[in-house]
Image (spheres, helix red, strand yellow):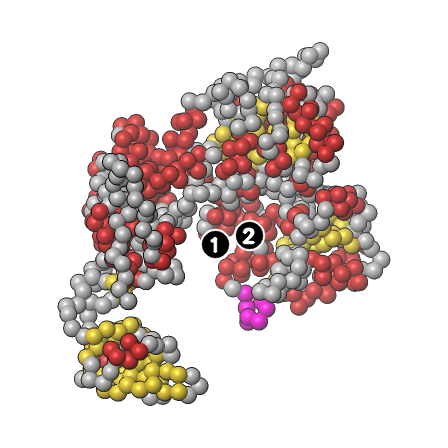
Amino acid sequence: MMLPAAPALDPAPNTARPAAKAPAKSPAQKAMEKLGLRRDIDLALHLPLRYEDETRIVRLADARDGEVVQIEGEVMHSEVLIRSRRQLLVTVDDGSDTCLLRFLNFYPSHQKTLSVGSSVRVRGELRGGFLGREMMHPHFKLAGGELPGALTPVYPTSAGLPQVYLRKAVLSGLSRADLRETIPTEFLSKILPLRLSSLREALQFLHHPTPDVALQTLEDRSHPAWQRLKAEELLAQQISQLQARRVRAAMRAPALNGLAMRGTHCTLQQQLLERLPFRLTAAQQRVGLEIEADLKKSIPMHRLLQGDVGAGKTVVAALAAARCIDAGWQCALMAPTEILAEQHFSKLISWLEPLGIKTARLSGSQKTKERREMLALIESGEAGLVIGTHAVIQDKVVFKNLALAIIDEQHRFGVAQRLALRSKMTGGGQEPHLLMMTATPIPRTLAMSYYADLDVSTLDELPPGRTPIVTKVVNDARRDEVIARIQAQIAEGRQIYWVCPLIEESESIDLVNATQTHVALSEALPDVMVGLLHSRMPPAEKKAVMSLFTEGVMAVLVSTTVIEVGVDVPNASLMVIEHAERFGLSQLHQLRGRVGRGAAASACVLLYSTGDAPRLGEVARARLKAMAETNDGFEIARRDLEIRGPGEFLGARQSGAALLRFADLQTDAGLLAWAREVAPLMLDRYPDLAERHVLRWLGGKAEFLKA
């Protein structure tokens, strides 16, 4: 079947007359659009997954079993056999030996090309068999014509997009793409390998490398051509982040200078500090001063507060809120779950209400009357602090004078949601200050790249009194021993979490679910209250279950990951995580942080199952090993980046924007440092080139990096 020619993706618009109706797109064109291949530059940057060496012919006598080789010979025998299934068997003789070609799926055209007497060129993996050496489903064509002078690229593709079509389209796009240099030589010369080739030369080489290249340098992306591309990509990201920072620096926000509440001589912050039943750690004091300095400025704060589980981020947020309210403005705190929002509400109201601050709560499950009352308090400005879930950003929520937006567990929210919260400030053309919080520490290389537009504050010290948590990795076959440990903890008056990954059984994943586990533990522990909590329960029921557990009435809480963040029960001393091998590393660390909040020695049991496999997979084993070896959230974060890449930390931050396609933050730290140094110089000295560079690499996606 003839495939349509590769389309020109950047046609000039016809402004002289109304455009004619566009012709229907072929399946291949639709598949290309799904892969994001719309511009010529997209095609030029669509790099091969691997390569096939069709540049030489190998004699069968010289080839070894297991090698992928290309041979040329005459078809000596061809027949269709029907045994357990229909198959085409073809014998080829290259003059040094013979080889059997075996096809389980084939068409009449295969039989025609591979008819007896034909001279064919065949490429595939050579294997030994009962009938001698053979190849299973090799590539083949009639012999003749010159051998190519470069390796043949194999591109990432999808259904309906054959490699032949894709190769032609990429070659066409590469020839048309505007690949004029956007990085001045003075910057490239700082990295010696990069000055050896232009961007066009680097791309042409990677699409069609010469056969003498060391394949390892292509596979591990250490070849100078790869280094050139990674440097360009990192520079585009850094310029985009720096542009976002500079745009924000030109915006205006309320300068929140501390004003003492009417009738008092000290600020709300000072009053709050005096009422707290604990002293701030040195890290909390340092971070508090960093945030305070930002809030005093008329430039919008855009700060990420990171700290390990239990490091005390909430009190830092409360102090920031107190400064905002003391200056006569409103503060909003948005959390990803109702449980977390409720925890924040209970804690903050106990701290701030005695100071005369009225707090409003918003959630999706509120009764109409209560919600109407809360909305009125917010719109009038009577509520200085507003706490809630996504309900905070709904259209009906109108603030009188919002000046500070706090987002907890920021990676759970998308770009649009953060922008919606920022847009709640009305009048004056001002932006609210933004404080984002995360209990998943951000590794340094990630902070330097994806979070380069943010100021980062770090709580690197835990409050005194937090007990170390002992973590044990236990095979599911020892479940009875774990239940015996639970009975011992209950006898000492302690409480236990048991976390499961699913609510209902899945046909594709055979996991023990929360409902079954609740029944089993209730039977094994007949004299104690065992509760069940999952996301599909009505909010009122969830709240009732959490109250029973928080008050100590319920001894065991079986839950899905809705208790991952925000739940604070000091008497809980044991956490059991069912099918721990299914969880991400940061999620395991978050769950573990629900215990060890009181004076009692605490433990976390990671129950794993290998299923039908003889052992755990490599990634799951690495996760569980990291959990057993360290409680340090920063070390956990470093290993998580090593194991899974940046996606675990970014969450929805990059909604609509591609992650780094080519650069690797683990191995390309040197290139990242270069990009950070060059980005401001490019923007200052060559603003037009900088703009072209970002457009080439990010297109319209740069906007998503700015939220």
SS of the residue under disc 2? helix
Q: Is residue 173 left or right of residue 476?
A: left
Q: Relative to 240, is 608 above or below?
A: below
CB within 8 Å, label 1 to label 2: yes
Q: Which residue is mark 2?
A: 585
Q: Relative to 517, is 462 above or below?
A: above
Residue at coordinates 26% horizontally, 64% vertically from top-left? Answer: 2
Amino acid at the residue labelled 1: Ile
User: Magenta stretch: residue 539 in it?
Assistant: no
- Image quadrant where residue 704 sits: top left
Percent from the top left, x then y, of residue 488?
Answer: 78, 57
Q: Which residue is mark 1?
A: 643
Q: Nearer the viewer, residue 171 or 460?
A: 171
SS of the residue under disc 1? helix
Residue at coordinates 29% horizontally, 36% vertically from top-left? Answer: 692
Residue at coordinates 62% horizontally, 14% vertically from top-left? Answer: 259
Q: Is residue 671 visible?
A: no
* Residue stretch in magenta: 610-616
Percent from the top left, x then y, of residue 133?
Answer: 30, 83
Percent from the top left, x then y, of residue 303?
Answer: 51, 31
Percent from the top left, x then y, of residue 305?
Answer: 54, 34
Q: Nearer the viewer, residue 59 or 32?
A: 32
Amino acid at the residue labelled 2: Leu
Q: Relative to 687, is 505 above or below?
A: below
Q: Earlier in the sequence, mark 1 or mark 2?
A: 2
Cα distance between the residues tagged 1 and 2: 9 Å
- Image quadrant where residue 141 sits: bottom left
User: Magenta stretch: residue 612 in it?
Assistant: yes
Q: Nearer the viewer, residue 99 or 439?
A: 99
Disc 2 crowd rating (10 Å Cα; few below 14, some 14-19, many 20+) is many
